[in-house]
Amino acid sequence: MSRPRPTSNRATVHDVAAAAGVSRGTVSRVLNGGYVSPTSRAAIVAAIAEVGYVPNTAARNLVTQRSQAVGFIVLEPHSLFLEDPNIGSIMLGANSVLSVAEYQMVSLVIDSDRDTKRVARYLSGGFVDGAVIVSARVHDPITRVVTDLKLPATFVGHPPDLAQEIPFVGVDNVGSAREITTRLAATGRRRIGMIAAALNRDSGADRLAGFRQALGDRFDPRLVAEVPLYDYSCGVDGMRALLAQSPHVDGVFAASDAVAAGAIQVLREAGRTVPGDVGVVGFDDSSWALRTNPPLSTVHQPAKEIGARAADLVLSQINGDHIAAGGALLPTPVVWRDSA
């Protein structure tokens, strides 16, 4: 026969202990991740369900000095945070790992100096135990805050000024850009341009470097259109700039799939066929790559895996595990479709 539920509005640790036939200290050890015998643990788990106990997270956090939260910090405009499938996949990958570990993910978007100051105060206040940071720029204030606080953190990408002891997860942007540009050139294209986005980030600068390496002596700086963001509208602007500079361009490497989609739209409006007149390739293998007509040749970026690996590294730091210096680069195979 089951015991009656406690008469108070909220069951307590004392109620759980009485129902399980153990001490309150034993219950507390289970709730805080400590060791108890399998028999006692099973009895406590059953008692928690029986009396309807809900842990007081705030009280526990005061004792453990942990928030059980990890920040997911994106240094991009709000519109890009909502529209970029790559960021969304990174976020879902991170959340899947944090959820299993019973950590809450807190999304923080930085789109202005005011946002930067607000997030810096938030991080300094101890509201999160660690952070996954996406799209940090060179000399970014958030990088300095994380370094000064010694906050457990992992960067997606590798800003050149990142401290040696802070791990990162990313891809070989230089090598991947070089590989897909080389393959585009092998289709017989002679005037290959690039819509180079986000050159204030390591990913954007590295993709331009890989493009330049692939072309070697054929590289023409006049065939590079610089745009600020990895988004569709920047692809539109960049392609218009390329056509104005070089109407006979016959190949385009767009720094992201969204940029490539904008470029293809402009080429269509200009009466150019893809890939007949102009071969177009992108980067990410995101949902944009299958929404273009024709489907886009691109570099597959394992965004969800990147997010998961980044979150796992943050949790390892929180738990005091040894983390090797440096970072991890995940594989990025070329996915060849019909756009080039």
Image: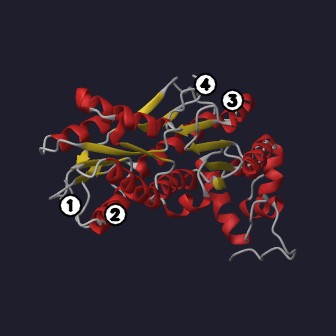
Asked if labels 3 and 4 touch by Cβ distance under 8 angstroms, the answer is yes
> On the image, numbered disc 4 is attached to which residue?
163
Under mark 4, the amino acid is Ala
Q: Nearer the viewer, residue 160 or 200?
A: 200
Under mark 3, the amino acid is Thr
Query: Measuring 71% from the left and 52% from the top, which residue is drawn there?
Result: 31
Mark toward the viewer: 2 or 1: 2
Q: Nearer the viewer, residue 109 or 9?
A: 109
Within the image, what quadrant is residue 191 found in?
top left
Q: Which mark is residue 274?
A: 1
Dot 4 or dot 1, earlier in sequence: 4
> On the image, numbered disc 2 is attached to which residue?
266
Instruction: Tell me where residue 63 appears, x and y as whole percent.
Output: 82, 44
Crowding near the residue tagged with mark 2, few <14, some 14–19, many ≥20 C-alpha atoms within 10 Å: some
Is the residue 136 above or below the residue 269 in the image?
Answer: above
> On the image, numbered disc 3 is attached to which residue?
147
Which quadrant is home to the N terminus?
bottom right
Mark toward the viewer: 1 or 3: 1
Whether residue 172 is visible, yes or no, is no
Query: Measuring 41% from the left and 52% from the top, which residue is drawn there?
Result: 238
